[in-house]
Amino acid sequence: MSLSQPAPLVLRDHRFDAAHPAVMGIINRTPDSFYAPARHVELDDALARAGTMIDEGADIIDIGGVRAGQDGDWVTEAAEVDRVRPFLTLLRERFPELVISLDTWRAGVASACAGLFDLINDTWAGADQDLVQVAAREGSGYVVSHTGGLPPRTDPHGIDYGPGDGVVNDVLRVLEAGAERAVAAGVSPDAVLLDSTLDFGKTTQNSLRLVATTDRVVSLGYPVLMAISRKDFVGETLDLGIDERLEGTLAATAIAAWQGATVFRAHDVRATRRVLDMVASIRGDRPPARSERGR
């Protein structure tokens, strides 16, 4: 398996690279997130969870106000702002050095939260074409994603990218074009994150293949984000429910980390941090915390 040298990610004064890949902890300000422990509707609860994640090794906290899939009620832009902006404000006040990610596909939401985030996690592949302009204006990072052309909150159906590595080639084409568009808009190249966006517009076989070929996305020359945590492709592969997908998640995490992914979006921060540190040490990018045995 390839040992691709990952491009570093730089957000504010923080640099994430092969020696220290970033864990992106997930906090959803939603009552219907697919993974119940990630639901943090009350502000005090969300803030406490953020503190725990930081203690467990989170480098970035990703805040979302809308469930990704089509299940659940539609959320208006105004309601999304009401869910995320107060918490972003509290998070910035309590943890001023923390790298904060805003998970939204709406330019209006990002504009309403100006000054409160360091990264826009656009999981719907530029559905709102003005969103990347907000990232550039704010001097923030920007996640370029791949959804196979599906609009926001659409679950995949009848997906077919053709034979062989068709899905890989499509992902590479879309991500490269999206990265070039972000840079042209004014986003710094070392703040552009590429996300194959597993599950979104993809079959389980597609997502498995994309994990196996993470190094091809890394080779595009931008930092790479992997959002693997407890997703359906893990559950379908192992025939497990959401609450039982940790081991499968961590196996895929280790494989993607070995190939050079830089950021990992995770519900289970402590376990993910330990896996990433171990992989970085095996790769030779991170020294062991101590090395006394046999001396």
Image (cartoon, grey):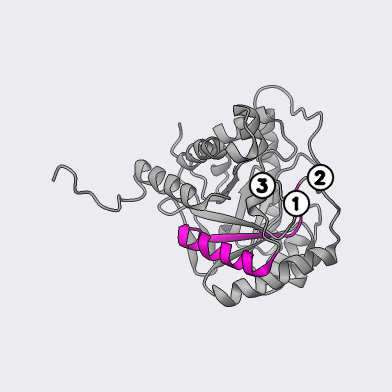
Image x and y of residue 185, in percent: 71, 62
**Which mark identifies residue 71?**
2
Residue segment shown in magenta: 42-68
- Residue labelled with disc 1: 32
Sort mark 3 into few (<14), some (14-19) or many (20+) by Cα contacts within 10 Å.
Answer: some
Q: Do labels 2 and 1 touch, CB within 8 Å?
A: yes
Q: Position of residue 168 (x, y in %)?
A: 65, 33
Q: Earlier in the sequence, mark 3 or mark 2?
A: 3
Say which amino acid is labelled 2. Asp
* Residue 54 magenta-highlighted: yes
Describe the element under mark 1 as helix, strand or loop. loop
Kindly state the secondary structure of the residue where label 3 is placed: loop
Identify the image quadrant of residue 282.
Answer: top left
Tell me the CA gap for discs 3 and 2: 13 Å
Looking at the image, can residue 55 be seen?
yes
**Marks 3 and 1, Cα distance to the nearest angstrom?**
8 Å
Q: Can residue 118 be seen here?
A: no
x 55%, y 48%: residue: 221
Residue on which the image places disc 3: 35
Q: CA distance from mark 2 to mark 1?
A: 9 Å
- Residue 183: x percent and y percent? 66, 58
